[in-house]
Image (cartoon, rainbow, N blue to C red):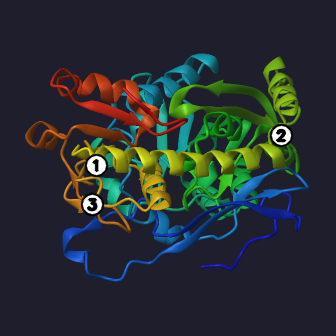
Amino acid sequence: MAGAQTRCMSCRAEAVEEFLDIGTIPVANNFVPADKLDSPEPAYPLRVGYCHNCKHCQLLDMVSPTELFDDYTYLSGVSDTISEYLRGIASGLVGRYSLGPDDLAVDIGSNDGTLLTGYLAHNIKVLGVEPAKNLLELSSAAGIETVCDYFGLETARDVLKQYGKASVITSINNFAHVPDPHDFVQGVDVLLKEGGVFIVEIHYLMKMVQDGAFDTIYHEHMSYWGLTPMIALFEQYEMQAIRAEVLDIHHGQLRVYVSRKGELEPDETVGATVNRERELGIPGWETCSKLANNAYNVRTELLSLMDKLIDQGATMAGYGATAKGNTLLSFLGVGPDKLKFIADRNPIKQGTYTPGHHIPVVSPDRIATDKPDYLLILAWNLTDEIVREQSDFLDQGGRFIVPIPHVRIL
């Protein structure tokens, strides 16, 4: 693990100042198998800082990508909401850019191939780039050819030799994982055909601040992007944002369409989004401090509520064995003494334990068996889907606790 990073990974200035310290915690997606519970469990500082030069936000302590992503437990296809959303991205790009059988679509961080399956009905050639070896069997079963590697300039050159240039390249919730965005953007430039488009989508810093979504901070997310610093990064490589969309999915995403300068014309959404950021002071030191203050307030309020309910004899479990949930639980110091289990539909996670505090992860069937009084929704960005799925739990008198953006009971 590298030491504290006070140099900005975007503008490279020595101008990054800490604004939130989550603590020294295990990697959020490193769920622990039952036979490894007694093994040493690495933990790393999780601190996030703000660049006073270009306004970029990033982690101050970087964990090696190989530890984070070589074996990965998140699956795109488990959530119906996310699966539909990802396939919709592909279908939308086919229509927007009139893609046909001669076009190649590349998805960086392709996971189990869910997004790329959205192109198949349109006879578009597809290729995934995904470093997690354990996901290759899933993407192959979905009919997706995948290069198992981390994306950057060298990988892009290898892909170019074998598959040719891409008409569209997508990076959905992957660009924030990149320790060297300069190498990444250079790779995009090499692989993208003339007139092609790179579509990057990330958790939006503006929405993180507005929603108080501090739990989105974890070791995988090395960057927390606003459009303003992202534009400055792409301009260093003669690339430009041509469209910007703020989306509701995952409590707020920023989708940016990028082309080489002079190839496609930017529309009014880019200037409008930059102006909106400027009006709200995002990214900015004051708004980052606001995010930190919300984290401390949620911790105090949620711990107080949980202790009160337990004192009253209530039982609690969690729903959604998510990375963001593990950030929240680690920040609170919550273990199986407060949450009996965490239910999750992902079969890879079932039978494992959360990193750090070792709360068991089980099938949602366990909810009907154990009948907890309260379910803490850790995947709170999917609250509507979870409440619909667990309607029987509500009908039988169960209640949901939603932790963010503010603590509330449903």
For residue 376, side relative to residue 128 (left or right): left
Labels 1 and 3: the sequence-earlier one = 1
Mark 1 → mark 2, Cα distance in angstroms:
45 Å
Q: Secondary structure at mark 3?
A: loop
Between 109 and 33, which is closer to the camera in this rendering?
A: 33
Residue 151 percent location from the top left of the image: 59, 58
Residue 45 percent across, percent down from the top left: 58, 72
- Say if mark 1 contacts mark 3, CB within 8 Å: no
Label 2, residues with CA under 10 Å away: few <14, some 14-19, many ≥20? many
* Callout 2 secondary element: helix
Q: Which quadrant holds the N terminus?
A: bottom right
Look at label 2 and name its amino acid: Thr
SS of the residue at dot 1?
Answer: helix
Distance Cα–Cα, label 1 vs label 3: 10 Å
Give the camera-side residue of 32 and 260: 32
In the depicted structure, whether residue 10 falls above or below residue 399: below
Q: Residues within 10 Å of mark 3 (few under 14, many from 20)?
A: few
Rendering coords of residue 86 (x, y %): 46, 31
Residue that badge 1 annotates: 310
Q: Is residue 155 above or below residue 304?
A: below
Question: Image point 72% across, 44% down: which residue?
Answer: 290
Front residue of this view, candidates 300 and 344:
300
The residue carrying mark 2 is 228
